[in-house]
């Protein structure tokens, strides 16, 4: 990996880490994000609030071996969850793990988040649920790894949300869309039975033509 590529990844991680805090998707030292850079991942350090991480403080970890290449600060306690996900799905280039309030609230009362609107269908698709598992353990890492092959967004019961993408931009905006979906669903459910997209409507959006829509949607998000 070139120095230039690594620095670019570090700066992008720093930017999106601060966006997660600004959008209220995490509080305090909660949450962790990472990005793949060839054979390593750059991961948030343990004990840091995401908005306080500087570009040179992201921790390098070898994906294949799990070896931590920086010894000044420990990697996030969810290091196994990130490692296992990268190992089982080589298409994943970035992972965002947050604790959005509406997502957590949804997992306390429901085991599904139906398809509600086109942006959700195009950018996220089917959302997986993982029953509560003790955080920071290999049990949680394995539970998430079982889902990342077929799902880019995973709700963790009583815990939060994990999203993946082919870059940080995609992974981050999936987080925003899932949180908005959970917010809309809970609000609608409070006053009646929500009207959800039918399978036919969902599949229509997910058709080949929707790829252009998805790209345009991401380009509009800054």
Image: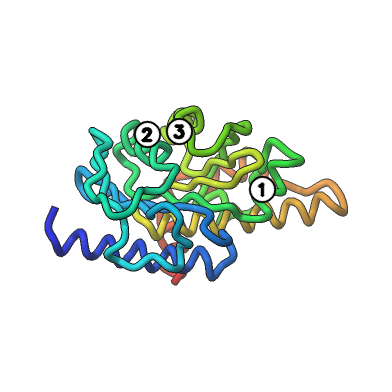
In space, the residues marked 3 and 1 are separated at their CA atoms by 18 Å
Location of residue 93 with respect to 28 vertically, above or below: above
Front residue of 40 and 168 = 40
Reading the image, the residue beneath label 1 is 104
Q: Is residue 46 left or right of residue 27?
A: left
Front residue of 192 and 44 = 44
Answer with the quarter of the image where residue 119 lies. Answer: bottom right
Q: Circles 2 and 1: CB distance less than 8 Å?
A: no
Q: Earlier in the sequence, mark 3 or mark 2?
A: 2
In space, the residues marked 3 and 2 are separated at their CA atoms by 6 Å
Q: Circles 3 and 2: CB distance less than 8 Å?
A: yes
Residue 205: % across, % down: 53, 49
Residue 141: mark in rendering: 3
Residue 84: mark in rendering: 2
Element type at marker 2? helix
Answer with the quarter of the image where residue 85 lies. Answer: top left
């Amino acid at each position: 990996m070139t120095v230039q590529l690594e620095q670019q990844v570090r700066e992008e991680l720093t930017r999106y880490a601060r966006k997660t805090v600004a959008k209220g998707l995490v509080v305090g030292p909660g949450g962790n994000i990472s990005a793949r850079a060839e054979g390593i991942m750059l991961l948030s350090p343990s004990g840091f609030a995401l908005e306080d991480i500087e570009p040179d403080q992201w921790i390098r970890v070898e994906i294949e071996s799990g070896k931590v290449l920086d010894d000044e600060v420990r990697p996030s306690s969810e290091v196994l969850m990130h490692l296992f996900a990268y190992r089982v799905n080589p298409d994943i280039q970035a992972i965002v793990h947050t604790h959005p309030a509406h997502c957590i609230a949804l997992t306390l009362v429901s085991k599904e988040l139906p398809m509600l609107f086109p942006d959700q269908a195009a950018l996220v698709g089917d959302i997986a649920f993982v029953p509560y598992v003790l955080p920071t353990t290999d049990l949680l890492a394995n539970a998430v790894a079982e889902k990342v092959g077929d799902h880019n967004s995973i709700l963790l019961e009583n815990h939060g949300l994990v999203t993946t993408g082919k870059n940080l931009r995609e992974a981050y905006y999936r987080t925003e869309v899932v949180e908005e979906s959970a917010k809309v669903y809970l609000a609608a459910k409070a006053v009646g039975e929500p009207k959800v997209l039918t399978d036919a409507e969902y599949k229509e959006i997910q058709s080949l033509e929707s790829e252009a829509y998805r790209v345009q949607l991401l380009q509009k998000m800054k």
